[in-house]
Image: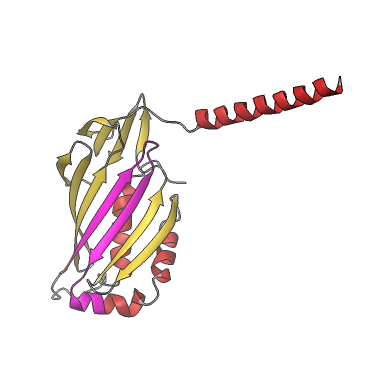
Amino acid sequence: MNIQRPARLILLIITVIATMAVLCPATAPAQLESTILTQDIRLTLNKFGDGDIEIKQTMNGLQWTTWYKLYGQNPSLIKRNIEYELSAYEISDIKIAVDATNRAYVATMKQKAASMYKGNGIWEIELKKGTTVNKLSNDEWLLNTSDTTGNCILQNNIKVRFPKGAKNISQAIDETGKPIIRYELSYASPLPIFLAVAILFLILAIATATAKFSKVI
């Protein structure tokens, strides 16, 4: 399972969905004018580093006509393609909503390990080189990237909402020289909760057994 650089998944999803739409042919003629695709992406992180991802793409008339003929009446094809292309990642609960009125569609999904835990309460999200970063509020940042696929220019607006309690959020360079966003948040392992529940059941079982044994005596 590839979760060593989990934040790359966001950029991979961007490319996969745009390519699926068959709006960015890799062999487009050189003289063909580039198509601009804008995608609005929201990543909401929880205290365990997992994320809810929402990707919305709005198209012009020609783009929509092309996309709708292939996928508009059968969104399950998009879901199947996402599952196939992202099979190396822990992706679940993929949903596709088509908004014909606004010539748009929205893909939502959940991802395990969207943020990487580095130890000592430090978390990191890898950024693509050249990403423009703007702080919108104490817990929400906006990332802007631009990529080229085939004859398409992909303009991506990624809003990242950090979990409650995250602090000292900053841009940094990791040990390999890659740009990242780093923040601090005490690691919230679910193990103590399960352990507490297990102990509670054990106590109840012992108490029940003791009560039955007392009645027998």
* Residue that appears at 32% across and 70% down: 98
As drawn, is 131 to the left or to the right of 115? left
User: Where's residue 6, x and y in %?
Assistant: 36, 44
Foreground residue, 127 or 91? 91
* Residue that appears at 51% across and 28% down: 192
Q: Quadrant of residue 100?
A: bottom left
Q: Quadrant of residue 101?
A: bottom left
Q: Quadrant of the C terminus?
A: top right
- Asked if the stretch drawn in magenta spans residue 32, the answer is no
User: Where's residue 67, x and y in %?
Assistant: 29, 75
* Residue that appears at 25% across and 79% down: 65
- Asked if the stretch drawn in magenta spans residue 54, the answer is yes
Q: Is residue 174 visible?
A: no
Q: Is residue 217 above or below residue 24?
A: above
In magenta, the rendered stretch is: 37-65
User: Where's residue 44, x and y in %?
Assistant: 31, 46
Q: Coloured how?
A: secondary structure
Which residue is outermost to the front?
A: 215
